[in-house]
Amino acid sequence: MGTLAVGDLAPDFTLEADDAKTVTLSALRPHKVVLYVYPAAFTAGCSLEAQDFRDADKPFEDAGYKVFGISPDSPEKNRAFAQDLRLPFELLSDPDHKVLEEYGAWGEKTAFGRTKIGVIRSTFVIGSDGRLTVVEYNVRAAGHVERLAAELGVPWP
């Protein structure tokens, strides 16, 4: 599947979270959702991004957003990552990268001068109507959450 665009209906999914519960996107309505895609738990960039979302979780929550991370990591690895960083939001597991593919967040990418297939760090903001209001691909972890908060009018901690 290709990339998504603002205004598209966010593809629905049901995935296992780090707390062993399942999360279904359509069941979260009428909440707004921030879905951030990260390549792998316990890596430097992914840890930085997760900590920034952790530190901004209350302002995002106060603004009506539920934050979720999604990666191909197992629920067990996500659980350890969430516990290690004291994350207040759920991390979703997509080991067969089906949802990542639907969102256009799995594909060819260049890292360290090499081209490979894998997770494309991305962020999707889904409105209360299920439509995408923000679509960002090839996100850089450093400063991303602060910039997203400013774009959404969410106070930065």
Image (spheres, helix red, strand yellow):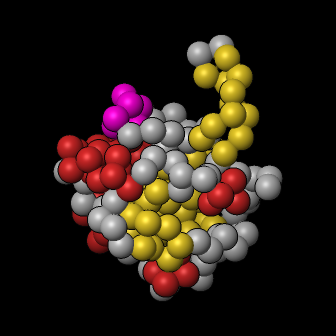
Q: Residue at x 64, y 48 (%)?
A: 105
51 relative to 13 in the view: left or right = left
Q: Residue at x 59, y 82 (%)?
A: 129
110 relative to 45 in the view: left or right = right
Q: Main secondary structure of the magenta part?
A: helix
**Could you tell me residue 152's position as x and y percent?**
47, 60
Q: Residue at x 61, y 22 (%)?
A: 111
The one nearer the camera, 143 or 94, is: 94
76 relative to 85 in the view: left or right = right
Residue farthest to the right, as pictured = 2
Decide whether residue 62 is among the magenta residues. no
Magenta segment range? Answer: 42-47
Q: Quadrant of residue 84?
A: top left
Q: Quadrant of residue 137?
A: top right
6 lies above or below 52 = below
87 lies above or below 114 = below
**Could you tell me residue 68's position as x and y percent?**
42, 61
Q: Residue at x 41, y 46 (%)?
A: 145
Q: Is residue 73 visible?
A: yes
Q: Is residue 68 visible?
A: no
The one nearer the camera, 148 or 122, is: 122
101 relative to 72 in the view: left or right = right
111 lies above or below 19 = above
Figure label count: 0
